């Protein structure tokens, strides 16, 4: 027997995804609709009566008169005319029972399609708590479709819907005229079917919002939360990441003990295990960040944070929604770019993805520390500031300023088209553990399977470039000089010499593609300092100080503000946008900015007398 | 008076949503979200920087609107 095709539709914030999670559990497939960055969620379930159901969780929509790519997908699938998707045999229209004034209008729009439909009154527990009495039978009669109650956050909350799925398909409702005033119909339905058992009291939202949206207190609450979140992503993840690093290192050592030295051992240890380690090491940050984001989103706080920050982000032509992804990018652009899913507006999301790599990520700190320590004198400026600290601050600031400029340039290409905020501030809710766990599980799985495979294969490729061909017997100097990477480094010098790079830097940049912090150990390898020792940086610093000019060091610092060479970031962009073109655009513009900034920095520094080693 | 000029905490009623241009999609969306003649509306909060955006309550729903969007919403002066 073939599965019944059912689609869940409803307004955003109707609890549709919680219901989807309750019905399908972990039997979900998350992907994108072909050609668009709209998330496609499909799950399977077997009803108590043994019926197999293929359930599609359509993007939330306020209206079938679509204004965003999400709503276009929902509109076309509901109407049964989306290419590559079978028309749903049953539409399950989910509503928030506490907000029927808004949600019933959408039900009427869906009914106008004339397809078999069931309406779900979700969040019935909250509706009862507010003293709402809904005459379900009367509503069902007035709409001409089955209406069932549900509480998606309770384990048994979808029983009525499951029985409805077991029953025969309801007949298609007779088409209503599309042009009629849905709001007038909704008023009549509410008057006839909904009453109150207790007088309306001040809602929880009113009391909480007085604090949360307060111009001063609201910002204090917001910055406390953001500070904790940033701390969590930045420092709480660190011990786990160190543990993962140590784990993969000892795995590598164990293999070194067993296998004889040779290309196979090198491939396993330096290629595959090191590559897998560089994938898994992202997981703690991704999981911690998404635990925060999912909690903030489920609780209803995230749109309020966006409200408070909207004006602030308008400087860059973005909305408040872009703030958290960009803040997370200071820890790492990979989770930051994954977090852009919370930005509904597609152009905003794309611009945010494009500028996320400009936020100075933590992987750039080792490079900054090494070069600042070696080249910037440790002395006081104006009595209170430390020059090294000022340079570090200037590097962070340059990243932010260039992000604002890039965002504004991207926005100006769109012309004067208005781009509204129009964001619902949903009811506050206690986040459900099941939904948090499923959300985290999906993020982790997507990252490991889609992004991880790209990073791992590129890591192995870079290993091969840095290892082959092997140096001839009796050759002196580090092995990497004889490899393709060494050859590439020398070839790159033609391009990089005008910005003051030496061939050693160029060689270091090749394995540095895998992860920005690898550049330090790669430089150590090239200068034959030995990259395994813990004091690599402190031994490398005097060597660099002796061999490079100040202009070269400043140029490399400027390069790292833009650091176009992070394969993990590019792989994440590929996964999140589904487009190699956007990956190419990102890499090209970052490279252009890095080259330009380094060129200017180098030549100004040389003019000021910093050109000598 | 327009919704963008309404003081926080003062109850008001919507008269209509004006189109800025022919087939203004923002105005259409506002109407779909329930900003229709006769609905009671109230400003519940204003943004911390320059009073933009504003948060309004209409029925049981709250929306954040930029001033440019709220400016399209004309209030019923007889009932404010």
Image (cartoon, coloured by chain):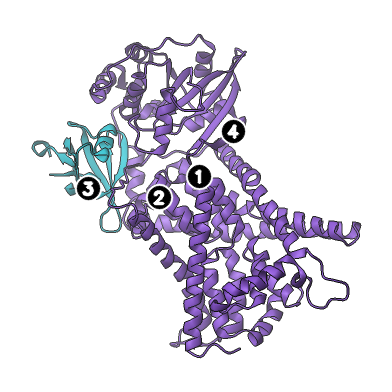
Chain colours: A purple, B cyan
Parent chain of label 2: A
Residue A295, disc: 1
Could you tell whether A169 is left or right of B45 in the image? right
Parent chain of label 4: A
- Badge 4: few (under 14), some or many (20 or more) residues near its Cα, within 10 Å? few
Rendering coords of residue A28 (x, y %): 59, 31
Q: Are marks 3 and 4 on the same chain?
A: no
> Which residue sits at x=85%, y=71%?
A472
- Badge 3: few (under 14), some or many (20 or more) residues near its Cα, within 10 Å? some
Query: In this picture, is A359 found above or below A175?
Result: below
Gap in Å between the C-alphas at discs 3 and 1?
29 Å
What residue sits right under mark 2 in the picture? A348
Gap in Å between the C-alphas at discs 4 and 1?
22 Å
What residue sits right under mark 3 in the picture? B8
> Which residue sits at x=65%, y=76%?
A503
What residue sits right under mark 4 in the picture? A29
Residue A387, disc: none
Q: A326 or A464: nearer the eye?
A: A464
The mark closer to the camera, 1 or 2, is: 2
The mark closer to the camera, 3 or 2, is: 2
């Amino acid at each position: 027997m073939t599965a019944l095709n059912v689609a869940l539709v409803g307004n955003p914030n109707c609890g549709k995804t919680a219901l989807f999670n309750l019905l399908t559990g972990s039997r979900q497939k998350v992907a994108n609709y072909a050609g668009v960055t709209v998330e496609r969620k499909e799950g399977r379930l077997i009803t108590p009566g043994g019926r197999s159901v293929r359930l599609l969780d359509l993007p939330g929509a306020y209206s079938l008169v679509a204004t965003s790519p999400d709503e276009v997908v929902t509109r076309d699938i509901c109407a049964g005319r989306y290419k590559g998707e079978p028309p749903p045999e049953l539409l399950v229209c989910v509503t928030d029972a506490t907000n029927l004034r808004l949600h019933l209008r959408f039900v009427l729009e869906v009914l106008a399609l004339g397809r078999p439909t069931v309406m779900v009154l979700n969040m019935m527990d909250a509706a009862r708590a507010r003293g709402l009495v809904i005459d379900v039978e009367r509503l069902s009669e007035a709409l001409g479709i089955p209406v069932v109650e549900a509480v998606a956050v309770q384990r048994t909350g979808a029983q009525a819907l499951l029985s409805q799925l077991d029953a025969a398909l309801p007949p298609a409702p007779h088409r209503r005229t599309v042009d009629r005033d849905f709001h007038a119909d909704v008023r009549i339905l509410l008057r006839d079917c909904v009453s109150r058992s207790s007088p309306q009291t001040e809602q929880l939202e009113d009391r909480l919002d007085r604090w949360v949206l307060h111009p001063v207190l609201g910002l204090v609450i917001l910055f406390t939360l953001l500070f904790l979140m940033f701390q969590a992503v930045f420092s709480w993840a660190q011990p786990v990441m160190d543990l993962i690093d140590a784990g993969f290192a000892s795995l590598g050592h164990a293999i070194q003990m067993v296998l004889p030295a040779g290309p196979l051992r090198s491939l396993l240890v330096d290629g595959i295990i090191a590559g897998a380690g560089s994938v898994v090491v992202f997981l703690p940050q991704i999981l911690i960040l998404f635990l925060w984001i999912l909690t903030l989103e489920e609780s209803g706080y995230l749109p309020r944070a966006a409200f408070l920050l909207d004006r602030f982000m308008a400087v860059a032509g973005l909305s408040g929604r872009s703030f958290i992804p960009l803040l997370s990018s200071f820890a790492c652009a990979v989770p930051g770019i994954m977090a852009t899913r919370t930005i509904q507006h597609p152009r905003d999301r794309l611009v945010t993805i494009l500028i996320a790599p400009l936020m100075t990520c933590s992987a750039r700190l080792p490079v900054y520390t090494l070069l600042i320590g070696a080249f910037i004198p440790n002395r006081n400026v104006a009595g209170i500031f430390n020059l090294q600290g000022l340079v570090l601050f200037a590097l962070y600031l340059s990243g932010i300023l260039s992000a604002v400029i890039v965002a504004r340039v991207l926005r100006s290409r769109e012309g004067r088209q208005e781009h509204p905020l129009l964001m619902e501030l949903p009811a506050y809710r206690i986040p459900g553990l099941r939904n948090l766990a499923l959300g985290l599980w999906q993020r982790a799985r997507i990252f490991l399977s889609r992004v991880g495979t790209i990073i791992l294969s590129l890591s192995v490729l870079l290993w091969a470039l840095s290892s082959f061909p092997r140096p001839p017997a009796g050759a002196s100097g580090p092995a990497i000089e004889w490899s393709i990477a060494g050859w590439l480094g020398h070839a790159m010098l033609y391009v990089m010499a005008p910005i003051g790079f030496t061939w050693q830097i160029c060689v270091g940049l090749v394995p540095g593609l895998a992860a920005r912090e690898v550049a330090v150990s790669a430089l150590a390898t090239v200068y034959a300092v030995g990259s395994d020792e813990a004091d690599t940086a402190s031994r490398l610093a005097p060597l660099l100080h002796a061999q490079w000019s100040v202009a070269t060091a400043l140029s490399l610092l400027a390069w790292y503000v833009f650091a176009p060479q992070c394969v993990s970031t590019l792989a994440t962009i590929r996964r999140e946008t589904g487009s190699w073109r956007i990956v190419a655009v990102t890499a090209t513009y970052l490279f252009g900015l890095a080259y330009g900034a380094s060129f200017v920095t180098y030549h100004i520094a040389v003019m000021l007398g910093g050109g000598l080693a | 008076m327009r919704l963008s000029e309404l003081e926080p905490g003062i109850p008001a009623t919507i008269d209509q949503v004006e189109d800025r241009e022919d087939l203004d999609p923002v105005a259409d969306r506002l109407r779909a979200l329930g900003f229709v003649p006769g609905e009671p509306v109230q400003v519940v909060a204003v943004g911390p920087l320059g009073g933009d955006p504003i948060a309004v309550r209409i029925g049981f729903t709250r929306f954040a609107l930029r001033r440019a969007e709220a400016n399209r919403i004309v209030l019923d002066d007889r009932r404010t």
